[in-house]
Image (cartoon, rainbow, N blue to C red):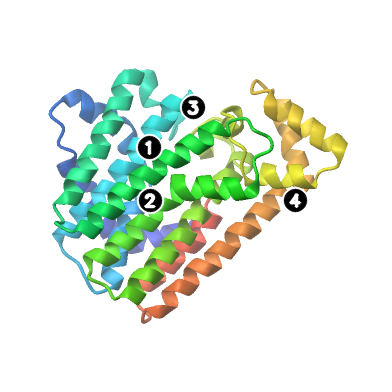
Amino acid sequence: MTGIKQKLLSLVEPDLQKIEVALENNLTPHLELVRETAGHLMFAGGKRLRPLLIVLSARICGHENEFVTKFASIFEFLHTATLLHDDVIDGADMRRGKPVANAVYGAAVTVLTGDFLLARALNIAAESESMRIIKVVSGMTEEISQGEIHQLIKKGDITLSEEEYMDVIRRKTGVLIQGACKTGAILANASSGEEQALTKYGDHLGMVFQIADDILDYTADTGELGKAVGADLREGKLTLPVIHALREANPADRARMETIIVNTGFTNEEFDALRKLLNRYGGIDYARAVAADHVRAAKAQLEIFEPSRTREILAMMADYALQRRV
């Protein structure tokens, strides 16, 4: 795992440096408090996946200029906004190994900072003077909001189906990754075939990243996650490993699992017991298999492009998405 991560970082380091500069230069709030609140999370070690995908998607279609990097920054703004809002809604304690922004600056400032980031993203999108770009970006914010509301409605619902789960993560996580790839292609004036291939690649990649995150909640420790182990379950979020295990469990074990799930104050011992049941009924393995199918589908979409270093990086990102530890 260290090998693929280090190789990826070495290949994209120049792009990551430019993206970091763009984030600093394009945040431009009028109040220092807004910069501090946004920066508390934005500059706390994110992977910059979404802006990087825009740069790479444009590049594989033969397009590269300074505006692409500036435009790419809006996807980190959007992602940060969703995380700031999430942490307030979920009552989270930690994010990326540090206290959540609302614990430091208060819920009101955090929510309004998230709103500022959404507006800043739309403002930069408008600089493209492309109605297609503006429509994609505004459509993403709409989809994300609906995904959040759907997840909130289903909070703690042990009857959540796999189909509903997939719909939520596609709206909440997948739409930003898909949109990054799609807008990169649009900026490059790519052919319809290239744009469609990158859009589908992004759709599958987004599913891999979220399912992998959901697996990590049951396989990693707090130090790796940067948040408390079991945080998703405590927040009432049922994810694919749990959904599958509940479906496969015998009545006694299902009842035991349900008792732990509905009690958000479960102990570490109870959480360990749940993890053992997830493994017994193949919840982790099933989720990995579903994610692996999306990895294969994502990489297949890249075959429309000629072999290149950029194509190699995009394929490697799909592999990394599932194999990563953090």
Please give the label number shown on residue 248.
none
Q: Identify the element where label 2 is drawn.
A: helix
Q: Residue at x 16, y 56 (%)?
A: 128
Q: Residues within 10 Å of mark 1 (few under 14, many from 20)?
A: many
Cα distance in 3D space between marks 1 and 4? 31 Å
Is residue 154 toward the left or the right of residue 198 in the image?
Answer: right
The residue wearing badge 4 is 282
Task: From this view, report whether residue 157 is shown above or below residue 281.
Answer: above
The residue wearing badge 2 is 176
The residue wearing badge 1 is 82
The residue type indicated by label 2 comes to: Leu
x and y, in percent, of residue 301 in the image? 45, 72
The residue type indicated by label 3 comes to: Asp
Q: Earlier in the sequence, mark 3 or mark 4?
A: 3
Cα distance in 3D space between marks 3 and 2? 20 Å
Cα distance in 3D space between marks 3 and 1? 12 Å
Task: From this view, report whether residue 20 is shown above or below residue 114.
Answer: below
In front of the other: 167 or 312: 167
Circles 1, 2 touching at the beta carbon (< 8 Å): yes
x and y, in percent, of residue 149 in the image? 47, 35
x and y, in percent, of residue 139 in the image? 33, 49
In front of the other: 233 or 4: 233
Residue 325 visible: no
Q: Earlier in the sequence, mark 1 or mark 4?
A: 1
